[in-house]
Amino acid sequence: MSFLRSAQFNLAIALVSLSLLAIGCSVSAGNDPYFGRTAPPQNHTLHYVTGSEVESLDPQVGTGQPDTRIYMALFEGLVEYGPKTTLPIPGVAEKWDLNKDSSEFVFHLRHDARWSNGDPITADDFVYSFRRGFSPAQASRAAYLGYYIKYAEAYNEGAVFVRDPKPNAQGEYTYVLEKDVKPEATGIEAATERAPEGEDASLDTPFHHFMHAPSRLVLPGDEKDRAEEINKDPKLKAAVAGKEFVPVKAEDIGVEPIDPYTLRVTLTQPAPFFIKLMAHQFFRVVPKKAIEQYKDTWTQPGHIICSGPFVLKEWKPYNRVVVERNPYYWDKTEYWKQSPTGEKIEQIIYYPLQDNSTIMNLYKSGEIDAFLNHTVPKAWLDVIIPKRDYMDAPENAIDYYDFNCKKPPMTDARVRKAFNLAVDKEAYAKWRKIVKPASTFVPAGIFPSYPTPQAELFNPQKSRQLLAEAGYADAHGNYDPKKFPVNDVELTYNPDGSNGEIAEWVQAQWKQNLQLTIPLKALEFRTFLTARPKGEFKGIARDGWVGDYMDPFTYLGLFASGAGDNGTQWTDPKFDKMLDDANRIPDPQERYNALAKAEAYLLDQQPFLLLSIPKVNWMKKPYVKDMFPNPGTLHAWKFVYIETDQSRWDQGTPDMTGEELGLADWQKEQTASAR
Amino acid sequence: MLRFIIRRLIVIVPMVLIVVTLTWGLIRLAPGNFYTGEKRIPKAIEKNIREKYGLNRPWYVQYGKMMGSVLRGDFGMSLTYPGQSVNQILWSTLPVSATLGLLAYILALAVGVTTGTIAALKQNSKWDYASMAFAMLGISIPNFVLGPLLVLLFSLTLFWLPPALWGGGSPANLILPVLTLSAIYMAFIARLTRSGMLEVLRSDYVRTARAKGLSEVQVVFRHVLRGGIMPVVSFSGPALAFLIAGTVVVERVFALPGLGNYFINANFARDEPLIIGIVAFISIAVLIFNLLVDIGYAYIDPRIRY
């Protein structure tokens, strides 16, 4: 092997390593204010990476955030996510009214809203869309979001009403009512039993009377389940004897077209936050005509009819989705807005990419103009964070660990508090770089007027003292780590992304501050997701929540009894009542105050270990304007434009404190009076 | 020969069915479902989904349905991509993976066989050491390192080529992924060719050929290469099948719409029809390419007859 030892070989090695080093330096060096090539596109096209491949272009099928961003181009709902705050701005509805206890909404649709084939969008289209979404055959995964709508849950579950087999003289059937069998079911249901307000005669319809009549009894549609439920309760058995079971129909759910441009939605409970849900893709209007004609393939280009500011031009899975302007879209003022030199966007190309380094490469070489959240890889952050095109803002999400409150030793709130206080969240956030430390469960800083409760971030002294009080102490009452049943606790997580590193980091904190070595246990993603909600883990499990809508209730509601997605297994009737009371308060600010009190109570119970609020962590070229790092990373595309005048480019994270874009005049007045 | 081919073709059917059955069983053993997500869904919605996709029927009914679809060659609708049929996915991704795989393999063959031959003929020379050193590099640098390195050099420093995306399969978009993909095959083929050739060079029939007075060119091309390339031929069958069936890493790094992306995501998502469809496709490809290799043997090596 003379060559391997020869001078030439050494020289070759040296040359190769030198050239690699040179490349490396050229990447990390650079005092450019922006990252990579920064030249506005010339062809009126925005190139955007939206994340993994879209599940479906049917907004009632796809549930992922990458899908949502494409739906926001193609389909509009009653309201749209505001570009700065993600709070609702008018969509097809130009105005809406609420009744006194926030359990009924009347939407006034704009008369100039049109489908991309020119047909008007009417209240009937929304009724069709809602009924389709809840139909069991559609099997939509997001349907639960709309269970606040009266009888929507019953219809979605395929449940039945119970009635007398024969109608009375007027041809009306008598139904068994919920209060007949469950007098204890007061609370929510009873509150809606009131006469309709007679302010506007045209609003007083037979359907409205049905909605506000006492709730009908709902039983499972499945015969076996129903028999089981009936046999358990003798009173129920007597009430349904000799009666007939009729399936809950699509026409029974609480959505009613009063006229072509007025839609009424009746809820089962006071839910002032319901309007914030209405921007969700599940509630966007879908085209009856195309769906009935093309069935499963209605979303293909050529078949699809859109309601949003853009229409579908091309869809190549794992390659790209191309949308172009919808000529029939109603908004002619904000829409296609441009600065004197601004470049309007004629089309958007969405790329479904999953590899973060690939996305960064494309961004650097100028092939794409912006990309989705959580994308800048950790190794790049030191170079990227100082750049002016890096987006830095908190998200509508929280990272935390569940304590299994049903299994000792985590049944003791003092132990839970101790484990929480023994982790230094400031240091954690510094280490992770792309998170903010969290001391509360509702992410601080994304709900402008929500009075976030005070809570301690880190106190190792106190945590040891708490454990001593919980009985893990020596004869002198001092904390003794040897007494703690380490074998009854492990930290379970799914080893995706940084979860493993994070678990090790937190484990080190406990070791340092509590002298406890808590074992780690990694479980494959889907295995983990099956075990966690059932509480099948010892002590502690990784968890996280992304808000379904922009209201603290999407966080606090997780711990309400029967919420289902609660890995901690902690529930408390007192907490349930606090939430319910808060939701009955009509004044938004007072409601927020009441919710904050409920949160303070929850924090005192500490069913979770709080880690951090993720930051959005994405980039956009400075010439892409009116695209904001909002808490949901959901962009109302009609506002986005390209600025060719370099002096108007964004010089950092754009200011999001000013007035929201696209608000109606009546909303502006409201927000002004609130201030 | 014809009987041999027919016999092998008939064997493909039960082989594929066995592979598919095993795969189906494994999917069933894996915990979780295609609809399991980070957010838990209510029981009623789960029931609606199970109803819609027939998951609440007994296992033998589901198995029968799956087998029926495999035998018909229509794998049904994907579960994670409603609105896209598995066949549609196979047909749209195959051209991408096949273009990439075939180009990479042709490049690998051309470069690999040439360098291997030169290395064998000039054994223990600088040529030999240099080419084998590069082959060693090719084998030891994984493609998830090589790909980004090439991107760094050609896309982000020199700005010559796009760093990723399919772009309708234009040559500029193809160069880097093809290079990345072919490197390891190039290296393998070079080493296989070299060792195969070296063995043949020492054999009696080559000495005979030389004794007959054939020119060196004739010796190399008519006798040595034919014998020396046999290991490369055996290697080609499975290699080609897997190249065409998609190459996950390269597709991810260069964001290409090939079969590999679907396969990996289908597995994570427990998308049964899609997994079954792709597995069936890959196993058929492997079996057919192996058959082609066996036919190739008989054609190249006069000693082999079926």
Image (spheres, coloured by chain):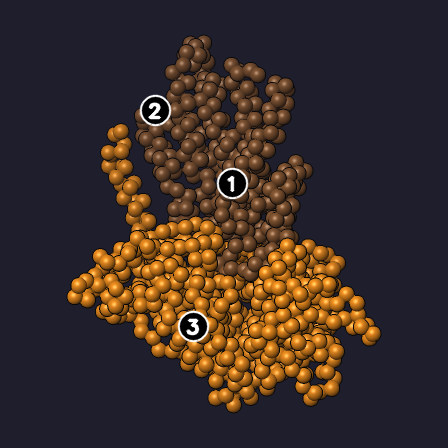
| Disc 1: host chain | B
Left/right of residue B72 with respect to residue A670 in the rendered view: right
Label disc, if present, on residue A393 of the rendered structure: none
- Label 1: state its secondary structure: helix
Same chain? Circles 2 and 3:
no
Residue B296 image position (x, y, % from top left): 55, 23
Residue extending farthest left: A476
**Dividing the picture into quarters, in which one does residue A218 lie?**
bottom right
> Residue A200 in the image: x percent, y percent?
71, 87
What element does badge 2 sit on?
Answer: loop
- Rendered view: A178 above or below A669: above
- Badges 2 and 1, same chain: yes
Residue under label 3: A442
Q: Which chain is brown?
A: B
Which colour denotes chain A? Answer: orange
Give the quadrant of the N terminus of chain A: top left
Spatial CA span between label 2 and label 1: 49 Å
Which one is in front, A322 or A473?
A473
Residue topped by disc 1: B26
Q: What is the crowding at mark 3: few (fewer than 14 residues within 10 Å), some, or many (at least 20)?
A: many
Judge by depth and name the residue closer to the eye, A622 or B29: B29
